[in-house]
Structure formats: structure tokens, C-alpha cells
Image (cartoon, rainbow, N blue to C red):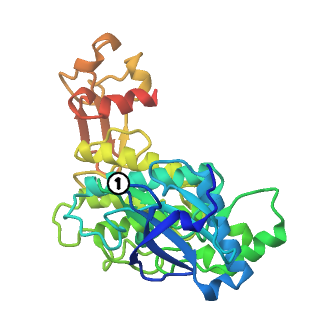
Amino acid sequence: MDEIGNIKSWVKTGESFPKSGQGEARKVKRAGSSDGNVYVLKTMQPSQARRPERQERFRREIEALCKLDDPHILKIVDYGNDEKNHPYLVTPFCVNGTLAEADLPHASIMDTLRLFTGICQGVAHAHEKGIVHRDIKPANVFLDANNKPIVGDFGLCFLLDENADPDQRVTETMEVAVPRWFGAPEARDGRLEDVTPAGDVYSLGKLLYWMLERRVFDRENHRSERNKLGRRVDDRREHELVHEFLDRMIVEDPVARYQGAAMVLEAAKQLILVLEAKGRPILLNFVHRCDFCGQGQYEFVNGPEDLTRNQTSSQELGFSNVHHASPANYRSFFYMIAICNKCSHVQLFRPDMVKGAAKLWMRES
């Protein structure tokens, strides 16, 4: 990326944003351009610019954004130093503001998860580039003209650089504070060894809960009676599946979480397919609670090997007229069989009759 390095290349439109953290931001246009595009110029507050560690944090945000190139990450358009030799950066203006202030229509769980996958994609790209965001919250997720989510504000990010000076990295870690409602428990202590992508995973879980409920809660008790999703909804099947998804993110032990945003993204996509299938068991590695007793979990009595070798006997299970066809006729006659490990309730269905099921079942093989 070419560095213009001259803050006068940007013309202020007069509209500024509320001050937050260490920066000041206002709308700008490129000097001499008639394309009408609006950008955001971010500079340092004078009181913050006098502090070397704050300048370093600002430059670290620039360094992180320069490494990233994903449609769900806020793109850096220009950066450099102002007339006082303080850093500045320029990014596109997202017309629909932030997730925190957006007046979105009441979305279904499915629509919310689809929006969430965009956020996960951006964070997963950062993790792939060795960057932990550390400040994931609604105010740091922007929405473009199409309400596409864009992750921004990398001012608190941590660069997982094994070659960095350990003393410097400890200082940077101890100097920052995580967001109260969304930060991982281990991040509150500021220990270097605790800064991992799993911290962002915890924040993603808290963010998803907020997107569904528009409220926050402390610690890890998303299953408490007070915090349960859809408390006033009779059919809780969808909400229970989401809670099981949150169980792998909003948990105190980092080892018990998904270990990165890429894993969260894949699990979210699978959950969407499960919800599209109305909660029917279509995945081998996804927990499906029994529709009948609500206590047990469905376990499959056939697996991917049955696509090429149909050895399960439906008569042995007490079923009649169940077709176990050859692989050539799989799409028309292959049945999946699942039995509850608590009450023995049985689910039978054909993957070709459930949206997305055949594709997922084939991928397991």
C-alpha cells in the first residue's frame, strides 16, 4: 500500500464522532477528488499523543490493518504522521454505523447467525495472520451500506510474533484493559501467556448472545434461568442448539473453547444447516437432543461407511419397509437412523429430503 504520509491530503467535512479511547475521528474526503466517497480520519487526542506507549498502540493498529485483507475487516486506505509527527490512519466510512447503534429489524436466529458468520470470518482472517483482536464488542463491528459486518478498531490487538522482544510484549499486554462485558476472564489479568485466539472466541460468544438478546451478562452463566435465550418462547429447540454452541465459547477454561475463530465459523455454518433442517440430526459430530424426552442425545446406528457398504439391518432394529439401497440409489432411498441414548426414541429420515443434509453427510465420509 502506498503511504501518502500527508494529512493534508484529506479534507475534513466538519462532522466528527464522539471521542473514545485514545483517538479522535471525523469524516473526510480525499482532497481534489469528486467521487463523493467519504472516509474516516482517525488521529490521536493531544493528551494521549504525548504518551509514547499510546503512540505505540496506535501504530500497532496501523501495522495490524496493513497485514489484513478480508471483506469483513475494516480496510486501511492511508496512514502516516501529521504535522506534529503523530500517527494517523484513514479507513472507509461505514454508512450504517456500528452494530451497537444499528436499528436492525427483528432478525430470526438464522439471520443473526448469518450475520455472525461474517464477523467470524473477519476475526478468523486476523487469527490466520497472527493477530488477536482483544476488543471484540458491538461498538467495534461496523455495518456497510448492505449491512455487511466489518470488524474494526484494532487498537488493543496483540501481534503473535515469536520474534518480538518479550519484555516489550509484556508491557503492551499489561498496559491495556479488556471490555468488561465481552472480554475473556484470563485477559483481565493481562498475563502474556494468556493472550491467545481463544480469548477472542470467548468475546465472539458474548457478542452472539448480545446480538440475539440485545443485553449483556457477567461471567459464564448464559444457561441460568435469568439469561436463557428465548425465555418467552414455547418451542426452545432452536435456542437449545444455540446454547450448546455458546457452551464452546462462553466458558472460563480457554482449553474448553473452540481454539480459534475459524473453528467458530465452521461450527456456525453447521448450526445454520442444522436449523434449516428443523433440528433433525444430520451431523455425526453435532450434539442433538432428543425431541421426545429432552434429556438424551441421538446417536447414529449408521455412518458414512453406509454410503458404500449398507450393513445395518433395519429388521434387527424392529423397523419394516426401510430401504437400504446401493450407493447408486443413495439420493433416493438412503435412510439415516438415530436413536436416543436415554429413552430410545427413533429418528428416521432421508438426507435427500432435508436441505443441506446430503452434502454434510457426504462430507463426513
Residue 363 visible: yes
In this rendered view, identify the residue nearer to me: 310 or 198: 198
Report whether 65 appears left or right of 346: right
* Residue 132 spot, x, y in % from top left: 61, 61
In this rendered view, identify the residue nearer to me: 313 or 215: 215
* Residue 269 spot, x, y in % from top left: 38, 45
Q: Residue at x 23, y 19 (%)?
A: 333
How many discs appear? 1
- Residue identified by numbered label 1: 148
Considering every residue shown, the one lying at the far bottom of the view is: 47
Q: Residue at x 42, y 65 (%)?
A: 141
* Residue 91 spot, x, y in % from top left: 49, 61
Q: Which of the 4 image quarters holds residue 143?
A: bottom left
Q: Which of the 4 image quarters holds residue 29?
A: bottom left
Q: Is residue 171 above or below residue 105?
A: below
Considering every residue shown, the one lying at the far left of the view is: 234
Report whether 343 appears left or right of 169: left
Q: Residue at x 56, y 67 (%)?
A: 8
Q: Which of the 4 image quarters holds residue 167?
A: bottom right
Q: Is residue 341 above or below residue 330?
A: below
Q: How many other residues sit within 10 Å of disc 1, few (<14), some (14-19) or many (≥20)? A: some
* Residue 251 spot, x, y in % from top left: 51, 68
